[in-house]
Amino acid sequence: MGMIYSSSAWIKVNLVHQEKVFGMEKNFMEVLKERLDENNLKKLLAIKNSKVHETVAKYIEHCNPDQVFVSDGSREALQYIRDAALAVGEEKRLAVEGHTVHFDGYYDQARDRERTKFLLPKNVKLGPSLRSIDREQGLREIHKIMKDIMRGHELYVCFYSLGPVNSVFSIPCLQLTDSSYVAHSENILYRQGYEEFIRRGKNGYFFRFIHSEGELDERKTSKNIDKRRIYIDLEEDTVYSANTQYGGNTIGLKKPAMRLAINHASKEGWLTEHMLVMGIHGPNNRVTYFTGAFPSMCGKTSTAMLDNETIVGDDIAYIREIKGEARAVNVEKGVFGIIKGINSKDDPIQWKVLHSPNEIIFSNVLVTKDGHVYWTGKDGKTPEKGFNHSGEWWIGKKDAEGNEIPPSHPNARFTVALDAFENLDSALDNTEGVRIGAIVYGGRDSDTWVPVQESFSWEHGIVAKGASIESERTAAVLGKEGVREFNPMSNLDFLSIPIGRYIEINLDFGKKLKHHPKIFAVNYFIRDAKTKKYLTDKVDKKVWYKWMELRVHDDVEAIKTPTGYIPHYEDLKRLFKEVLDRNYTREDYVKQFTIRIPENLAKIERIKGIYKKIDGTPTLVFKILDEEKRRLTETKEKYGDYVSPEQLEN
Ligand code: SPV
Ligand code: MN
């Protein structure tokens, strides 16, 4: 077809096409003309992409909203959505200028793994750990659930870009949602993409997200959560989400988009990772960029927010090879951060932002009568009463299951744009991203890994660190907390390709690089085996990052252990003094950096056991794990089960 867009021949061709694909009763132009007012229609038609128009028309017909608003990303459009969130009651104004609060339903407080599924065509297999449903059946089910689901609501049609606009990284996204809260959140978290859609016309692919919060109760929370579904269609780059409001299920560009992006990345030779991106500031004004993967609620945001360092992103990174270097962008431009535990001492930067007049959506926190917010772990006394995700709340209130309800939900969050932070790195919008000097992997591990160690090579880092992450479960997903879960690269929840293939892609990515980032593993959660007390303080990570930064440039030596290189005491002692003004004792060092051989060996067996069951695991995985096992066994024979770093020093 030619480039002339609005010819009648074009409409005819598409009419036929659309009848085949969608089974719509009217042609999509008729629907759009009927259901959009002149201004909104004009905004939509400025984008010369029939698939955009078809999608909007189809879901207007199918979901049947009362009204449609097309956002062109202008200031007026953003204001319109902010106002709508307040008018509808999905958000309420708080005492501080720009602050609002939103509540999700009592049982809609986290990502719903059970009801998040891939729609799989008959011939495609993803392996048993990725939930799926037959594509035809799933499409029927979700469309049945979504029939007329937006009745009584307004539909917001929004355009965004994942990654900086007009760059090799950017992926345009079309979001349809009837939740003003979701649209508002996305306006804070993502770059506007209306202009990008106009620029691209019908070239290239884009992601589609169709969300409805469904019927709301009197508290404006989704009522029919038994019909909650998040269905992912890789064939059409589309995610459907219904009867839920919680951001991890609904904010299309966040975790829904990650699944679509991992699929594309795997075919196009780049990586989509659950990673922070930050600048660590070394000697002589040197900035070294780090990416870091941690499962949810394991310190990813607090790492990205370290004071005296700079943040590019705290959740999702796209990584591409450009001229032999690994380069990363933040897919987002805002933070959907955990609020629990944020206090003025440990988190000065976040604390300041949360107390300044800014555009912030607080979700599932406690709100007092005077319009102030409180969260578990905040400085000061817990208010006697207030309003939270359970409705009216007072100290000691219990839920239907007899559990005491905390003031704020453990997965309560705040949504704010990154430009509110004084530590924002100037590279946020670099169209070529930042050069990655180091990749860090970490999990919630109470008994195995030392606080920081450097892997021996790209392959060793990918296999023995990234692909071997295990983490004790947190409140970020529905289910029992504390259970140790395998979570390769902290990305398991978001994988849309078989695990073995994903590991292989990570290994292969290294082959393209002329300069390899160093790969480190950290553990912020190591405990004393007897007392069970944490062996490190929350702020100690500042020192680990400074040490890693020096290692990237070979500025300090390290001790070779069976699992990786660890710091010398003297280097840490100096850094603790410089960074935290603390006297770091040899005794603490030895406790923290003792190599726990039985635990490490047991872990290798667990990980090998898991990979043996995974089809397509690269053989290199077993080779590297066996080598690590051999090193550990030899060291054990020489020094015993628990080996102090001093024994390995020479
Ligand atoms: C996470 O849980 O990893 C988050 C929040 O970043 S969510 O949007 O729920 O995924
Ligand atoms: Mn995350």
Image (cartoon, helix red, strand yellow):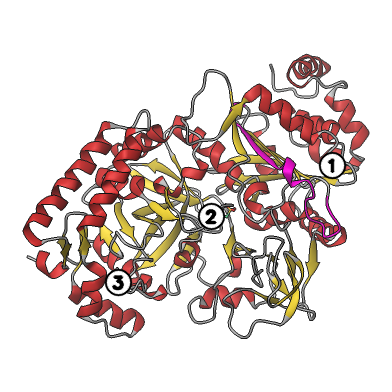
Front residue of 523/598: it is 598
Where residue 169 appears, as percent x and y from the top left, is 51, 42
State which quadrant residue 38 falls in.
top right
Tell me the residue that label 2 is attached to.
480
Front residue of 439/33: it is 439
**What secondary structure prevails in the magenta region?**
loop
| First in residue order: circle 3 vs circle 1 | 1
Which residue: 63% across, 24% down?
Answer: 135
Tell me the residue that label 1 is attached to.
150
Would residue 390 be found to the left or right of residue 129 on screen? right
- Give me the disc on residue 420: none
Quick check: marks 2 and 1 in contact, CB under 8 Å?
no
- Closest to the camera, between mark 2 and mark 1, is 2
The magenta segment is 216-235
| First in residue order: circle 2 vs circle 1 | 1
Crowdedness near tag 2: few (<14), some (14–19) or many (≥20) residues, C-alpha within 10 Å: few
How far is the residue under mark 2 from the one under mark 1?
33 Å
Q: Quadrant of the N terminus?
A: top right
Which element is circle 1 on? loop
Where residue 73 appears, as percent x and y from the top left, is 73, 51
Which element is circle 2 on? loop
How far is the residue under mark 3 from the one under mark 1?
56 Å
- Amino acid type indicated by mark 3: Lys
Tell me the residue that label 3 is attached to.
530
Crowdedness near tag 3: few (<14), some (14–19) or many (≥20) residues, C-alpha within 10 Å: few
Would residue 54 be found to the left or right of residue 234 on screen? right
| First in residue order: circle 3 vs circle 2 | 2
